[in-house]
Amino acid sequence: MAKQKTAALSDEGSAITSLRKAFALLNAVAASSQSLTIAEASAAASLSRPTGYRIVEALIAEGHLSQDASGRLHVGFASLPLAAKVLDTNRLRMEALPALQELSKSTGRRANLGVLYRGQILHIVGAEKPSLPIRYARFGKIVPLHCSAMGKALLAYLPEDQVKALIDSQGLRAHTKNTITTFKAFMKELETVRKNGFSVSNEENVAGLFAVAAMVRGESGPIASIGLLGRSLPSVLATSDKVIHTAEVISHCMDRAE
């Protein structure tokens, strides 16, 4: 009996390990800016090539990955129903969308809302001005906390020990020459965010790209941030009052919905 129980626990542990490896490989393919070969995806997920091949075969069979004629991997359609379920049932997204659409219309810019997810900002909803072609969905886009306006808008209202833990886990890697890379300077930046009521990214994540953002508050504290992008600092700063107002509207909607 004891041997059977030990064997069962061993099988369960092996299954969980295999599942984690499959998720790691799938996430590696999804996170890459270009399509990967099986060997490249395996390396990105820290897996051996034979293990990677076996996992890819299973993920393709289940529709979570697809492979083109050149052998490169892409995220499969099986992920879409899962994503749609999240988007269609997330109350924050539903409450925020009308306000984001109004913000986009009034500023002529795309408006995004993101939440804290695994130490980064995850976009869960956005609104595009009608005149811009929609080529790429931003749902699921992930941006760093420390060099994005949306990240700083959220961090500014979290306890300092939580901010430090997040920064320690993610680091302050320089993405451009303007990225803040010391904790002391970063905490000073967050003081400025609280003073102004909004945050700014001054070409800190991508050269030539500027942003302004404000925090959305829920019943228990900061729950999200909204932001606008632009190609010049004055142009995004000119929208700061509207961004703050929209964040307040969404916060009020969330309070009302509680």
Image (tube, rainbow, N blue to C red):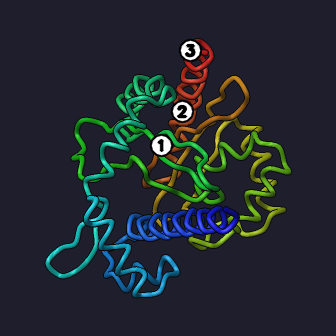
Distance Cα–Cα, label 2 vs label 1: 8 Å
Disc 3 on helix, strand or loop? helix
Distance Cα–Cα, label 2 vs label 3: 21 Å
Q: Amino acid at mark 2?
A: Val
Q: Position of residue 253 (x, y in %)?
A: 55, 17
Q: Residue at x 24, y 35 (%)?
A: 130
Disc 1 on helix, strand or loop? strand
Where on the picture, by quarter, is residue 29?
A: bottom left
Where on the picture, by quarter, is residue 85?
A: top left
Q: Which of the image's four quarters has the N terminus? A: bottom right
Q: Check residue 257 in the rendering and tell me which mark sits there, or answer none.
A: 3
Q: Which residue is mark 1?
A: 228
Q: Amino acid at mark 1?
A: Leu
Q: Position of residue 84 (x, y in %)?
A: 34, 39
Looking at marks 2 and 3 on the same chain, the residue that comes earlier in the sequence is marked by 2
Q: Amino acid at mark 3?
A: Ala
Instruction: Give neighbour class at mark 2: few <14, some 14-19, many 20+ (Cα, 10 Å).
Output: many
In the shown orientation, is residue 16 left or right of residue 217?
A: left
From the viewer's perspective, is the residue at label 2 or at label 3 nearer? Answer: 3
Q: Position of residue 210 (x, y in %)?
A: 51, 54
